Image (cartoon, rainbow, N blue to C red):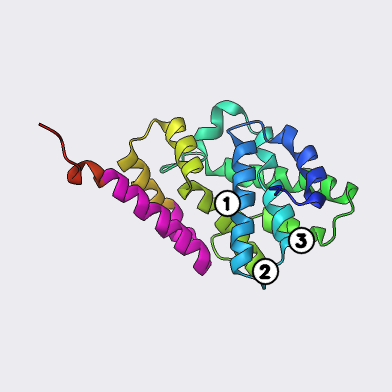
């Protein structure tokens, strides 16, 4: 079974050249998978809005100087202005892609992209699902591996970041359950040595 819907393959092909920074290509695909799982739990949400939005939400990082990327994110970001800037660039690029491919509900998709990182409250259920797929990625095994590599964080430091920064921003019941479950598994992993036999 293919990860991407057939109608999203063309969007991915156009998005991919903009996503070759800061592991955004991998992040986007894993977040798309998370979004599909959330959609399965929230049938009133609309995949024709959510899935194009998650595929195109981070295109604008391509236009941010690479040496500044890690200053815009993380536990204590110093360049929040770049987060707003990447959203504005993402909207411009996504509008062109969506329009050329005749995707419907362009303005609704763009409204979600414009604010996916900088607005914390959901303006719609579709917006909430996109936000949860994006932020929820941080709690996945893939997100943990990538982000810990960026900052050289220990597992304990990573758990602290996810607990303080990411999980409180999850909005839907399935999103919260996913985040809490992943963090619980990370905490259990941190405790494994306390319960394993050390040998003679």
Q: Residue 112: image x %, image y %?
A: 68, 58
Residue 177 magenta-highlighted? yes
Specify the label residue 134 is tagged with: 1
Residue 146 appears in the picture as rendered: yes
Q: Residues within 10 Å of mark 3 (few under 14, many from 20)?
A: some
Q: Which residue is the extreme one toward the front?
A: 200
Residue in the image at 64% along x and 64% along y? 39
Which region shows up in magenta?
A: 166-190
Q: Left or right: where does residue 14 sit relative to residue 195? A: right
User: Mark 2 to mark 3: distance in Å?
Assistant: 9 Å
Q: Is residue 30 above or below residue 129?
A: above
Quadrant position of residue 190: top left
Quadrant position of residue 90: top right
Q: Left or right: where does residue 47 sit relative to residue 84? A: right
Q: Left or right: where does residue 15 sit relative to residue 127? A: right
Residue in the image at 61% along x and 47% along y? 84
């Amino acid at each position: 079974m293919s990860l991407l819907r057939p109608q999203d393959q063309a969007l991915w092909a156009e998005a991919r050249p903009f996503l070759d920074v800061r592991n955004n290509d991998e992040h986007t695909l894993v977040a798309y998978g998370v979004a599909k799982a959330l959609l399965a739990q929230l049938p009133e949400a609309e995949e024709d809005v959510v899935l194009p939005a998650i595929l195109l939400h981070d295109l604008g990082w391509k236009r941010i100087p690479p040496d500044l990327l890690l200053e815009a994110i993380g536990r204590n970001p110093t360049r929040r202005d770049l987060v707003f800037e990447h959203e504005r660039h993402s909207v411009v690029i996504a509008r062109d892609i969506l329009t050329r491919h005749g995707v419907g509900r362009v303005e609704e998709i763009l409204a979600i992209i414009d604010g996916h990182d900088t607005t914390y409250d959901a303006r719609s259920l579709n917006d909430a699902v996109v936000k949860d797929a994006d932020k929820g990625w941080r709690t996945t095994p893939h997100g943990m591996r990538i982000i810990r590599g960026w900052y050289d964080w220990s597992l304990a430091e990573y758990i602290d970041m996810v607990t303080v920064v990411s999980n409180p921003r999850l909005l839907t019941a399935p999103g919260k359950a996913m985040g809490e479950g992943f963090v619980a598994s990370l905490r259990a992993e941190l405790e494994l040595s306390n319960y394993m036999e050390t040998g003679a």
